Image: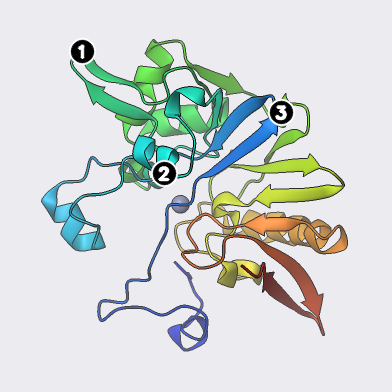
Amino acid sequence: MFGVVPKTLWSKHQSSDELNRVEAAFNCFVIDGGGERILVETGGGVRHDARAKQRMRLPDAPVVLGDALRAAGFEPESIDIVINTHLHWDHASGNTVDADGGAAPALSRATYYVQRGELEHAREQLPRDAVSYLPVNYEPLIDAGRMRLIDGDFSPVAGVDLRVAPGHTRDIMVALVRDGGETWCQLSDVAPYAAHVTPTWVPAFDLYPLESIQTKSGLFARAAAEQWWCSFAHDPVVSFAKIGIEEGKWRVHPKQA
Ligand SMILES: [Zn+2]
């Protein structure tokens, strides 16, 4: 998770278990109030065999996306748009559900947005990262005509901007929402944890680490200058935070509950 950063440094920010595993959330966000209801990310899903559950210490009964949405007050059928920042399994495994006739869209009314380049990369099934791309998370949506492929920066509705933010993958996106003079940025795996606020703290699984550093530096500079609220893909504690630079060091200031 922290790449070349030694544990002596990252362990000051993130605790780990006896096998060096760090706690991870599958953070999904609903953007509501602008006419269309938008879900950003669909999480890690429920299709895990016993071995995977043991290796990753996943719960025996993982949370079903629809139940998580209902618990938060949103009927799954009310979601108009799903944004897949990228197609790694830990972000897109709630995209589909297993039905009688095979996998079907989990959000029955939604149009799913993803970068065309990300889908093309997923379909290459390369040795380096094929394990992250499960066709069941996207092919049924393509077959059903429910996945919309976009090329570069795109605004699905007014006030919501999807920006390509290369590094983790070539075509990963972040979501920016502007409303009432404030900006929120879902950083996805550009910064999986708040501890990744230092631009050079790049996970080992980023495909293009030098681009990651450049992407993060650019985004964080704007986040600090414009006082954005930021969210992280996998931080189990920090949901919303502002980013600042103090005496040359990047800092995260979590929103107080
Ligand atoms: Zn991730």
Q: Residues within 10 Å of mark 1 (few under 14, many from 20)?
A: few
Q: Is residue 126 visible?
A: no
Judged from the image, the secondary structure of the residue bearing numbered disc 3 is strand
Amino acid tagged 1 = Gly
Characterize the local packing of mark 3: few (<14), some (14-19) or many (20 or more) Cα atoms within 10 angstroms: some
Q: Earlier in the sequence, mark 1 or mark 2?
A: 2
**Numbered tag placed on residue 154 in the rendering:** 3
Callout count: 3
The quarter of the picture where residue 162 lies is top right
User: Distance from label 3 to label 2 (Cα)?
Assistant: 30 Å
Spot occupied by residue 176 in the image (x, y as percentages of width and height): 72, 43
Left or right of 106, for residue 37: right
Amino acid beneath label 3 = Phe
Horizontal arrangement in the rendering, residue 160 relative to residue 203 (left or right): right
Q: Give the Cα distance between marks 1 and 3.
A: 33 Å
Label 1: which residue?
A: 101
Disc 1 element: loop
Give the quadrant of residue 215.
Answer: bottom right
Front residue of 40/133: it is 40
